[in-house]
Image: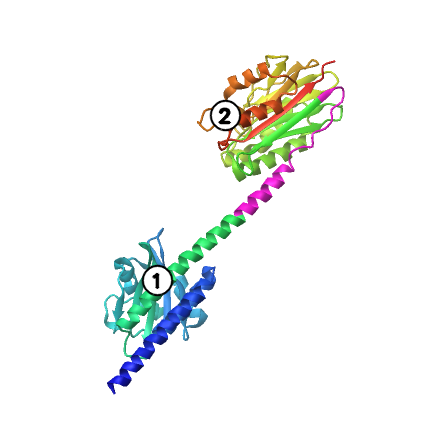
Amino acid sequence: MSQDICDNGTTNVARRLKKLIEANQSLADMESLEELLPKLMDIAKEVTVAEASSMLLYNPKRNILEFASVADEVLGEEGVKILKSTIELKMGEGIAGWVAENRQPLIIKDVQNDPRFFKRADKKTGFFTRNLLCVPMVYNDELLGVINVLNSKDKECFDTECQELLGSFAHLAAVAIIRSRLIESRLKQQKFQIQLEAASKIQSLFWPKLPELPSGSHVWGVSIPAAFVGGDLYDVIPIHDGSWLVYVADVSDKGLPAALVMAALWTKIRSEALLLSEVHQLLKTVNTAMYDLMAEEGFFATIIIGRYWPGTGRMELARGGHLPPLWMIGEKLGIIPDLKGASLGVYPEADYEKKEIVLSPGESILFLTDGVYEAENEMFELFGRQRLIDHISQAKGPPWGEGILKVLSSWQKKATASDDLTMLEIWRDII
């Protein structure tokens, strides 16, 4: 008789171990928590031969346990919804809270008479808990939650054999949850990477197709974001009288938020350019229109704008908090008139000055953002204005922009760009 009992017990252990092995194989194929958790609860019931099982996951931000999944043949979907939406346990509260806080398993033979038992869950759902086994889920000292199995079906109460089996299963479950989280995190990163690449392609559509200017004038431009997308922008817009509106702007901050503001600014300038060809009036109108959007989110944008007549080399300039352009006269720098005007988005009503220069044949004007001066090398040294001036004094031009870009690239080497970089150059041929 004792041999039969022993054989039966050995058979039960072998059957349950087989289920654990099958569970491990099954869980390895699951990638999402939504798919994983219900499967975990079904396996927990099978391994321990229980009426029901539940998992509470630990929320470290709130320091509580929350019902994540329940497997029960009686409760149905409505009972499960009640548990998930209305029941949560503080650390130390209820048997599950005690197990989570102490990170020790518990077998309770008569839960109704245990002072730690949290009776509200039974009252809410109508389920009657007789006995219970609860084990913690821990991975590398990180508490993930607890697993409960309720009401043993093949014996009076859960025993140490059930506890060992459920403890082994809890370890499998913890590994599966961590794996699932890592996969979901990687998928999110991949999705975000794809979105950034798409955003980069979309932003590149904002860069103008540089026109062939008449009368021996030329234009060249480039914009290189520090990340996938950035807040720098430049444009070349034809005006009805044969002049061209050109500008470079720099939205504060980098990345997607700055790129969205950039797109809004590009659109607004384009929509107003044909109506307001006076550069200082254009800046005033754009600033007033963009102020609410930019100020509310803490953005601003610096800008330098010019209206250029290719036939004469005349250029009207206005500036809003931006770096003055470089006026190359042979190997020297011309003096750009001082232009007063606040950055866009700083004041709701701002006034801007307009002043005029004339590019003679062989001369060039270069609009640029501070990403040129603030380019860093691997030693975290700034390129600076003086290095740029030294290069211009030694190089031959115009144009100067392409040479400056090569020098900057050589200076930076493998250093990561810390800011967006934009240049726009206009020059006249030597007659």
Residue at which label 2 appears:
374
Q: Quadrant of residue 40?
A: bottom left
Question: Is 197 colored magenta in this rendering?
Answer: yes
Question: Is 5 colored magenta in this rendering?
Answer: no
What is the magenta range?
192-217
First along the sequence among labels 2 and 1: 1
Residue at which label 1 appears:
171
Residue at screen point 31% across, 82% down: 8
User: Residue 75: x, y in percent?
Assistant: 41, 73
Q: Nearer the viewer, residue 234 or 321?
A: 234
Of the 4 image quadrants, the one containing the C terminus is: top right
Label at residue 319: none
Q: Quadrant of residue 367?
A: top right
Of the 4 image quadrants, the one containing the N terminus is: bottom left
> Would you say 208 lies left or right of 199 here?
right
Residue mark closest to the camera, 2 vs 1:
1
- Helix, strand or loop under label 1: helix
The kind of residue tagged 2 is: Glu
User: Residue 345: x, y in percent?
Assistant: 54, 30
- Helix, strand or loop under label 2: loop
| Res. 425 visible in picture | yes
- Above or below residue 208? Residue 27 is below
User: Residue 20: x, y in percent?
Assistant: 38, 69
> Would you say 319 lies left or right of 186 here?
right
